[in-house]
Amino acid sequence: MAYTFLGGIHLKENKNTAHMKAELFTDVAFVAIPMQQHIGAPCKPIVEVGDTVTVGQCIGENNEALCCNVHSSVSGKVTALEPRRVANGASVIHAVIENDMQYTVCPDLKPVSKPLEELTAEEVISAVRSAGVVGMGGATFPAYAKIQSALGKVKHLIINCAECEPYITANHRLLLEQPEAVIKGIKILIHTFGVRKATIAIEDNKENAIELLEQKITDKALIDIKVMKTKYPQGDERQIIYALYGKEIPAGKLPADVGCVLFNPETVASIYRALSSGMPVVQKRITVDGDCIKKPCNLIVPIGTSFKDIADRCGGLKKRFARLITGGPMMGQSQWSLDAPVTKGTGALLFFSETKEEIGQCIRCGKCVRACQMHLMPALLAAYSEKGKYEECERLGVMSCVECGCCTYVCPGKVPIVQYIRNSKGAINEQKRLLQQKGGN
Ligand code: SF4
Ligand code: SF4
């Protein structure tokens, strides 16, 4: 029987590109690489305009506690260092590099010199940090910091292969195309955490990947595969932990607090590459889909490739798009510019023609309550938030909302519940910040 959790919703999967092998797209004239593609402090450029750079060369760093190095994804010349908007709207310094199309690899890149069994956790953390590995499923939390903070606490190492958002198939294709890189990356993490084994958690709609992994995993005592029901948001780490171990993460706590740590498979493969060749994160796997794009596909692109170059590579647009989303349609971010670049956290580009629906009224059907995986009362939260009653929202647990979007999706009244919830969370956080400031003065 497949593992699952309480609540959630069944979405139309639209995994149109699941059978499409990811194609390497390197024919890009320029890349614009943001100095911040992770949660934490931005990097400072360590190159100057006019410098020649190579693939994998570090071009941005910062020694602050939470930061991730940035590397060049092409070889060529730095033509600008300038602030530009990234996908979430923030203004970040970008290194614009003119691609010489040679893809000359940085000569300084080296694999770690010791066999895995002799590596210390600190050596793994250092290599992962230098390579700029982040949570590549979209979270973008620096992987070295996740490993560091979970050391000594972890009993269950979980590889999150759920990929439960509609349309996205990039991780599914990775498992089919490079299972060895994922398996070797898992072995590195097993060694680093000192756990007995790891679990690959995967939804039952990826049968071919499950079969292939079963063939490729020779040591079944080290890595097991747990098949989960296809349901949204099965990929939410709280839901995976509940589905596999029946454990609930208390509000404000992390998976490591209940003995678990989760990694996305692309992150794991990047960790393997960082240690085996020294190659940092310079490419990203993405799914391109939506009713406006001519040729939906999976691509592997240099970090910093513009959305426009990707749309052109996919045959262009067959009609005007009303919404461009990076990531999945449920939790992804709407974009307004085709000039924004692919970063380490970009999992998909979805071009949709449909426009936003009108704001409606709650008809008290209770569907949002049944759909909520966090057992909240979304209709009430929305109503209180609309009236600015944020204390009531907090009392009802609004800060536990993971913004999965299930409530909005099932709502027949077309109430923009998540939007109200975000407003409420923003207002509560702002109040807390002001109070702290006051206390500090
Ligand atoms: S209230 Fe939050 S956690 Fe619950 S369904 Fe809505 S978005 Fe998801
Ligand atoms: S699903 Fe929509 S209409 Fe139904 S109770 Fe929730 S907010 Fe109201």
Image (cartoon, rainbow, N blue to C red):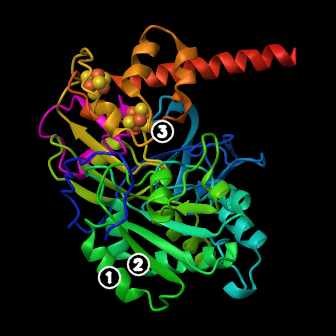
Q: CA distance from mark 1 to mark 2?
A: 8 Å
Q: Which mark is residue 212?
A: 1
**Distance of mark 2 from mark 3, alpha carbons?**
30 Å
Boundaries of the magenta span: 311-338
Q: Give the image quarter of residue 35.
A: top right
Density class for disc 1 (Cα within 10 Å; few <14, some 14-19, many ≥20) is: some
Disc 3 vs disc 1: Cβ atoms closer than 8 Å?
Answer: no
Residue named by callout 2:
179
Q: Is residue 75 left or right of residue 147?
A: left
SS majority, magenta: loop
Measured from the top left, where is residue 75 in percent x and y?
Answer: 52, 60
For label 1, the SS is helix
304 over 183 or under it: above or below: above
Q: In this figure, which residue is indicated by the disc labeled 3?
A: 402
Q: Quadrant of the C terminus?
A: top right
Res 344 seen here: no
Q: Nearer the viewer, residue 113 or 313?
A: 113
- Measured from the top left, where is residue 264 in percent x and y? 48, 61
Circles 1 and 2, Cβ within 8 Å, touching? The answer is yes
Q: Position of residue 246 (x, y in %)?
A: 50, 59
Residue lying at the far bottom in this picture: please name it: 218
For the residue marked with disc 2, what is the amino acid? Pro
- Foreground mark, 1 or 2, reads 1
> Can you say whether 252 is above or below 109 in the image?
above
Nearest the eye: 415 or 66: 415
Label 1 residue near ligand 1, CB within 8 Å: no
Q: Is mark 3 within 8 Å of ligand 1?
A: yes
Q: How many marks?
A: 3
